[in-house]
Image (cartoon, rainbow, N blue to C red):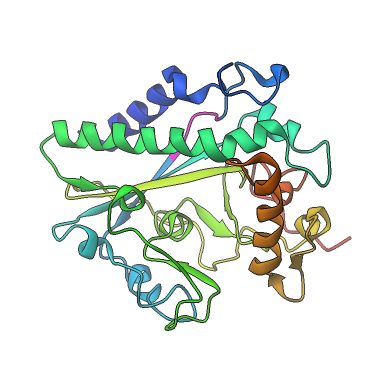
Amino acid sequence: MKKDELIKEAQDFLIHSADNLIGPEVALSKQIEGTNIFDPPILGFGDSEDTYFHLYQDPNIIGPDFLLPTQWLPQAQTVISFFLPYSKEVRESNRIDPSVPSHGWLHGRIEGQHMVEQLCLHLQNKISEAGYDSVIPTLDSRFQIFKNPPASSLLYSSNWSERHAAFVCGLGTFGLSKGLITKKGMAGRFGSLITTMHFPRDSRQYHNIYEYCSMCGACAKRCPAHAISLEHGKNHTLCSDFSNQTLAIYKPRYGCGKCQVAVPCETSIPKIKALQ
């Protein structure tokens, strides 16, 4: 199987999957029934031995609990990362109210994550049919999320990170809000899998972890929790507390996403410009 064939498999699966639609049985409102959650994905391919994966074990980046691709899968050759951009309908719905997540965005967080998982499983199946092994870290029984990990300087950590994997695979760089800015912007969700199948590595078109961010501060102005600032970046505690408030209202759904819409990096890489 060639890289282009796998990319087409991913795009076709998304286009034809019923899981990409907000069905009437789950829709929080009549207006969003039948709405597409995502547009077709973009994929990136990284080397399982990339030095960045080792750097992620630094306590100031992720921490020693982060597992290398070869720890997830000993004969790993390639890390495949994908980004699913939210549809125009989902994105536009979340621009309207500045303080409350839209119904479309809430579905994007929960039903959207189910779509991410289904795409991971579909790609895993195609790789298996080609005769190779693969692991989906976030669906693996070993996957863990840590709060206040003792060997890390972070409030939250995990032994695999979709955003950091996407950075290695050439999909984009981080923004002030700590989301990842891709050529399709940052409004969307990421998934990844690790495989023993070799694919040519995609070259990274950047050198700095914040290279695609203009530091314009638009996301800080949009944040209802006041969790983002040019001076201090993102305060994860304030962000988490706000998300927990939405969970209390919309359980099991939660989220916010205001920093990802109505900003220059919503659907593309913003041009570097002076703060206005």
The answer, for residue 199, to whether it is visible in the render is yes
Image spot of residue 229 (x, y percent): 77, 69
Q: Quadrant of residue 104?
A: top right
**What stretch of residues is rendered in magenta?**
38-42
Identify the residue at horizontal 54%, vertical 68% (top origin): 208
**Magenta stretch: dominant secondary structure:** loop
- Please state if 271 lies on the left or on the right of 38 as rendered: right
> Is 144 inside the magenta-drawn segment?
no
Looking at the image, which is closer to me, 262 or 255?
255
Farthest right residue? 276
Residue depicted at x 62% and y 23%: 27
Q: For residue 149, what is the image quadrant?
A: bottom left
In the image, residue 87 above or below residue 204: above
Which residue extends farthest left? 131
**Quarter containing the N terminus:** top left
Task: Using the image, determine if residue 158 lies above or below residue 255.
Answer: below
Q: Is residue 39 magenta?
A: yes
Quadrant for the C terminus, please: bottom right
Q: Quadrant of residue 106?
A: top right
With 48 as the anchor, is 181 left or right in this view? right
| Residue 265 visible, this orientation | no
The residue at 50%/25% (across/down) is 20
Q: Residue at x 15, y 61 (%)?
A: 74
In the image, 90 versus 166, the foreground residue is 90
Would residue 168 be found to the left or right of residue 127 on screen?
right
Give the mark count.
0
Q: Position of residue 105 (x, y in %)?
A: 66, 36
Q: Is residue 254 above or below residue 10?
A: below
x, y percentage for residue 163? 48, 56
